[in-house]
Image (spheres, rainbow, N blue to C red):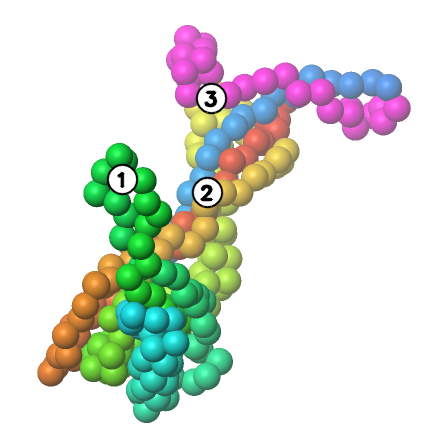
Amino acid sequence: MKKSLIILTTLLSLSAFPALADGDKTSGRDLKSTIAVTGTGSLRAAPDMAILSAGVESIAKNAKDALADNNTKMAALMAELEKAGIEKKDIQTTNFNIHPQLVYPNSASEDRAPEVVGYVVSNRATVRIQDLGSVGSVLTALVNAGSNDISGLSFDISNKKELLDEARKAALADARHKAELYATELGTSIEKLQSLSESGGFIPPQPMMMRAAKLEAVASDVPVAEGEMEVSITVDTNWFLKDE
């Protein structure tokens, strides 16, 4: 009895929960004990696609020249992606910006407005690479095509739904196992599930940052290691305990 009380007060969240008694569905209520446990299910799998952001930043004395330079380089970049086997549906423009380059006064005492010394045009696209074996060559091609703004290389899994469903099953099985173990130690057993809530999901690795103000042309393919990714689900459950 002493062992049961210790487990009751330190390991479990037990509460009196009002539920309709089987024999009286109108006004009678029995007080039933519940047990609260958390279950976790995790799976690891190799990614099958990569996602990166690539673009061109151009600077010129006036906006027209900056835009013309940017358009030419972006056209070359798109052509390289096409030669690398990237389909148009896997390329999406995500940012286009034109802004002046300003030089501010050296001190607050100078009573003059900032001076416009040039214009910056940036154009950026998100690229999805379905063939992981070509990631290194695509990165190299982008740099050689004139891209000077590459960042956010990350990996993804196309069948996340199937993996998440398997993680959910594992999480619920883990929660049930814990509930049954604790109930047995208390000299009873679980009756049925009262409630369940889910948290967690797909956990991607930190992206490989490749942003640089200026990238020189490279002769060989960029080495890339995709590793593995984790899918993890956590469930918070409450179970009714049987009346012994």
Q: Distance between the residues labelled 3 and 2?
A: 18 Å
Disc 3 or 1, which lies upstream in sequence?
3
Looking at the image, residue 173 sits to the left or right of residue 242; the answer is left
Circle 1 residue = 110
Tag 3 near tag 1, CB within 8 Å: no
Query: What secondary structure is found at the residue carrying circle 2?
Result: strand
2 is within the stretch colored magenta: yes
222 is within the stretch colored magenta: no
Query: Mark 2 packing: few (<14 Cα in 10 Å), some, or many (20+)?
Result: many
- Amino acid type at mark 1: Glu
Give the x, y percent position of residue 69: 32, 80
Query: Mark 3 packing: few (<14 Cα in 10 Å), some, or many (20+)?
Result: some
Q: Residue furthest front?
A: 111
Give the x, y percent position of residue 30: 73, 18
At a point 63% along the width and 17% down the height, the residue shown is: 16
Q: Quadrant of the C terminus?
A: top right
Q: Distance between the residues labelled 2 and 1?
A: 60 Å
Q: In this view, does 190 lie above or below 113?
A: above
Query: What secondary structure is found at the residue carrying circle 3?
Result: loop
At a point 35% along the width and 56% down the height, the residue shown is: 204
Circle 3 residue = 12
Tag 2 near tag 1, CB within 8 Å: no
Disc 3 or 2, which lies upstream in sequence?
3
The magenta region covers: 1-26
Residue 234 numbered mark, or none: 2
Q: How far apart are marks 3 and 1 (CA)?
A: 69 Å
At a point 43% along the width and 68% down the height, the residue shown is: 96
Residue nearest the observer in this picture, 206 or 171 = 206
At a point 15% along the width and 79% down the height, the residue shown is: 217
Q: In this view, does 219 lie above or below 34?
A: below
- Amino acid type at mark 2: Thr
Q: Residue furthest bottom?
A: 83
